[in-house]
Amino acid sequence: MSYPVLILGESGAGKSSSLRNLDPIQCLLLQVLPKPLPFPSQGWEKFQNSSGSIFQTDNPETIQKGIESAARLGRDIVIVDDFQYLMANEFMRRSSEKGFDKFTEIGRKAWDTIQTAINLPEPIRVYFLWHVETSQEGKLKAKTIGKMLDEKVTIEGMFSIVLRSFIDPENRAYRFATQSNGFDPVKTPWGMFQESTIENDLSIVERSITSFYGIRND
């Protein structure tokens, strides 16, 4: 069984930098937007001939194949960054199209990609790094295109672990929220985290998940 994790946050809130202490040998980073990593990235090389850690594509089917190949490649961790551009890029390419069918197709491809991560038989952790927006009710949510994913699915409901990356205004420290403040969809299993906020470090999240579920990485 796989363990999909949703990491929400504004641009610049520390989502991508949370990868800094992960071992790239364990990881497959699927970059929807090709961009330099925001930390010293020795060891994070572009994927080629089954080696390397970074693969750049905004094709949903290719990303799904990448997620499915993780175990075969010996990777315990998959990161998809920034996932909402999977939808935004296709929308912009198809912006001249009339009608609403494109929104349905874009939403379905995003749903299919998350389903691919959910249905992996191996104990792979799949992290979806995702920008946020504020709903009409004043609540934070995953940023989407069109209404299909909001009205028919509710993205956050597809995950058991939802964290929010933010900057603590008191000391300007980058943090992950592990409990909801009432205006965001943050949630984690009972007892997985002892604190309501932690350092924005995916290696800490990794240790918490593998310990909580008794996952061994041999």
Image (cartoon, rainbow, N blue to C red):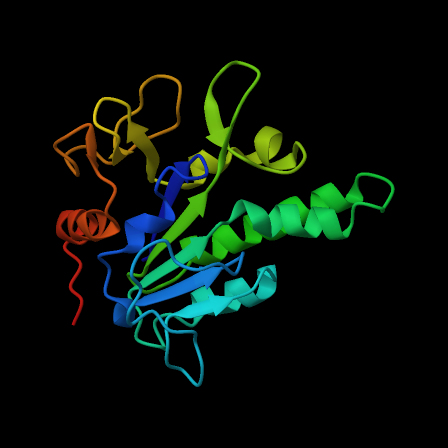
Could you say where residue 49 lies in the image, as x and y percent from the top left?
A: 44, 86
x 21%, y 53%: residue: 203
Q: Give 60 or 174, whichever is nearer the viewer.
A: 174
- Quadrant of residue 23 in the image? bottom left
x 80%, y 39%: residue: 100
Where is the C terminus found, in terms of image quarters? bottom left
Could you say where residue 82 lies in the image, as x and y percent from the top left?
A: 49, 49
Could you say where residue 154 lies in the image, as x and y percent from the top left?
A: 51, 33
Horizontally, residue 218 falls left or right of residue 36, namely left
The vertical placement of 124 against 150, above or below, is below
x 34%, y 42%: residue: 14
Could you say where residue 201 lies in the image, as x and y percent from the top left?
A: 23, 47
Horizontally, residue 210 falls left or right of residue 56, namely left
x 12%, y 32%: residue: 194
Q: Give 148 or 86, whichever is nearer the viewer.
A: 86
The vertical placement of 8 against 117, above or below, is above
